[in-house]
Amino acid sequence: MADKIAVAVDDLTVAYNYKPVLWDIDLSIPEGVLMAIVGPNGAGKSTLIKSILGIIDPIAGSVQIYDKPYHKQRHQVAYVPQKGSVDWDFPTTALDVVMMGTYGALGWIKRPGNKQKKQSLEALEKVGMLPFKNRQINQLSGGQQQRVFLARALVQNASIYFMDEPFQGVDATTEIAIINILKELRKAGKTVVVVHHDLQTVPEYFDWVTFLNVKHIATGPVKDIFNDDNLTKTYGINYKVAVQQ
């Protein structure tokens, strides 16, 4: 495992209406891991990702991507938002959505050309959505929509991928397809950070895990820290109860 730190979070605190959602978070994510962020509802998992990405402003603390502020490393990062936060009625095709992922590298003046279209088609093929390239995004199933957004992230060719509950509302076939792609990214040396709620699949899917419940509980290799003690600290319930939920 590489010792290089991809993401460093230092003393991060976020509050909504003066109520802390994240409190004094210190977190280092090594390069080249496939990491789950787990914790109960309201633990601040999505808020942590959005704070790292600069979508939410913290009231204290800082975030660095490869030792630089996020705004200087934006090109290194791709983001798949939570499905419920996307306007699926926006009139656009699956291919158009994926091609949006090329805008960052091009800048706002240049428009995507044949090269970007080819990259986008290849990304759609990788997620099994090439036959649906001209389908309106609102005519796709939930699992198909999620695959398209994953393709949009893939076409960015980022170093770090953040994904907010990518398995939410997808069928078993899509879930397996997505996790296989995430494992390929890790194999290629990418860093993948996933907000995840299914504790039963953590040991199978991920090699690193972060436990979060407003405060940072623990981070490390799944084989070392995915245990009864940390689950109890995070969820306040017995491990056997937690994995059956």
Image (cartoon, helix red, strand yellow):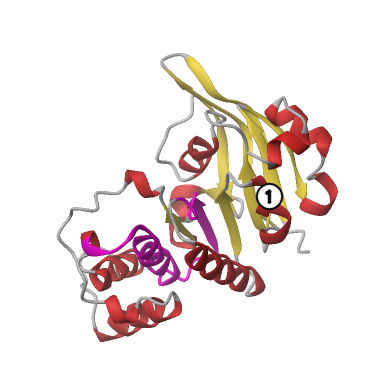
Q: Nearer the viewer, residue 201 or 12?
A: 201
Q: Residue at x 14, y 60 (%)?
A: 91
| Figure check: 161 above or below 54 | below
Tell me which segment is drawn in magenta.
139-168
Residue 177 visible? The answer is yes
- Secondary structure at badge 1 equals helix
Residue placed at 50% from the left, 55% from the top? Answer: 167
Nearer to me, 233 or 60: 233
- In front: 219, or 228? 228
Query: Disc 1 residue type?
Result: Gln
In the picture as drawn, the residue positioned furthest to the top comes out as 18
Position of the N terminus by quadrant:
bottom right
Indicate whether residue 152 is drawn in magenta: yes
Residue 29, position as x, y percentages in the image = 67, 50
170 or 92, which is in the foreground? Answer: 170
Residue wearing tag 1: 200
Residue 53: x and y in percent read: 46, 46
Residue at 32% from the left image edge and 69% from the top image edge? 98
Give coordinates of residue 17: x percent, y percent. 41, 15
- Locate the C terminus by quadrant: top right
Q: Looking at the image, is 215 positioned above or below residue 225?
A: above
Whether 223 is drawn above or below 156: the answer is: above
Where is residue 158 shown, x and y percent of the image? 49, 66
Q: Is residue 141 magenta?
A: yes
The residue sitting at 69% across, 36% down in the picture is 242
Is residue 29 among the parts visible in the rendering?
no
Q: Quadrant of residue 32?
A: bottom right
Disc 1 packing (10 Å; few <14; some 14–19; many ≥20): few
- Compared across the picture, whether 39 is left or right of 167 comes to right
Residue lying at the far left of the rendered structure: 91
